[in-house]
Amino acid sequence: MAEKAIASDLITGTDAEETRVETPYGEMTLWIRPLSWVDRQKALTKFVSLSADGDGNMAPKIDFGGYWKFVLTTCIERTEPALTTKQLLNIRPEVGAAIQAVLPSFEDLMAGMAGASGPLE
């Protein structure tokens, strides 16, 4: 007989984890919350669209800017030094590269979706 699950094993944590990131301009602190299953489902609607090719076959179109906008605004609860959402979306490329290392990658998200069936399957 299978062991019964407990609630805390079934849900993502609600507390953001404090993470320090070294940027070319000095250290910053991010409070990062994990993506839930629903967050992952929503993510796909933000950066993946389907379009027909010349033969009528459906092909995905991926907007990586949309992906990172979703991750930055969904996962990062706050920063030190304090940045507004508008400022966070306007970070320098080298700062983004440093932050990206501690956030869920596109590959992580897609790996988490592998094998999941959707309502249209």
Image: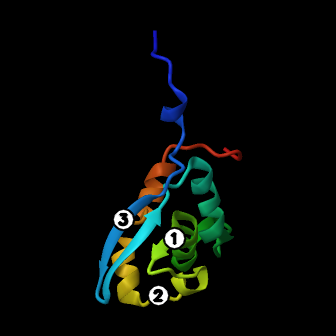
Whichever of labels 3 and 2 marks the residue nearer the N terminus, that label is: 3
- In this rendered view, identify the residue nearer to me: 97 or 113: 97
Mark nearest the camera among 1 and 2 is: 1
Q: Secondary structure at mark 2?
A: loop
Residue 1 percent location from the top left of the image: 46, 9
Helix, strand, or loop for circle 3? strand
Q: Residue furthest top?
A: 1
Question: Gap between marks 1 and 2, in whole Å?
Answer: 14 Å
Residue at image position (68%, 68%) is 56
Left or right of 21? Residue 81 is right
Quarter of the picture holding the C terminus: top right
How far apart, in angstroms, are the residues tagged by discs 3 and 2? Answer: 17 Å
Instruction: Describe the element under mark 1 as helix, strand or loop.
Output: strand
Q: Position of residue 27 (x, y in %)?
A: 31, 79
What label does residue 78 carry, if any?
Answer: 1
User: Which badge, 1 or 3, is on the more N-terminal residue?
Assistant: 3
**Residue with the mark numbered 3:** 19
Q: Which residue is mark 2?
A: 91
Q: Quadrant location of residue 22? A: bottom left
Q: How packed is label 1: few (under 14 Cα within 10 Å), some, or many (20 or more)?
A: some
Q: Amino acid at mark 3?
A: Thr
Rendered view: 90 above or below 102:
below
Q: Categorize mark 2 by other alpha carbons within 10 Å: few (<14), some (14-19), many (20+).
A: few
**Residue under the point 28% across and 88% down:** 24
Q: Quadrant of residue 23?
A: bottom left
The answer to which of marks 1 and 2 sits earlier in the sequence is 1
Which disc is residue 119 wearing? none
Q: Residues within 10 Å of mark 3 (few under 14, many from 20)?
A: few
Q: Position of residue 35 (x, y in %)?
A: 52, 55
* Residue shown at the point (51%, 34%) measured from the top left: 8
Q: Amino acid at mark 1?
A: Arg
Q: Three-letter amino acid code at disc 2?
A: Ile
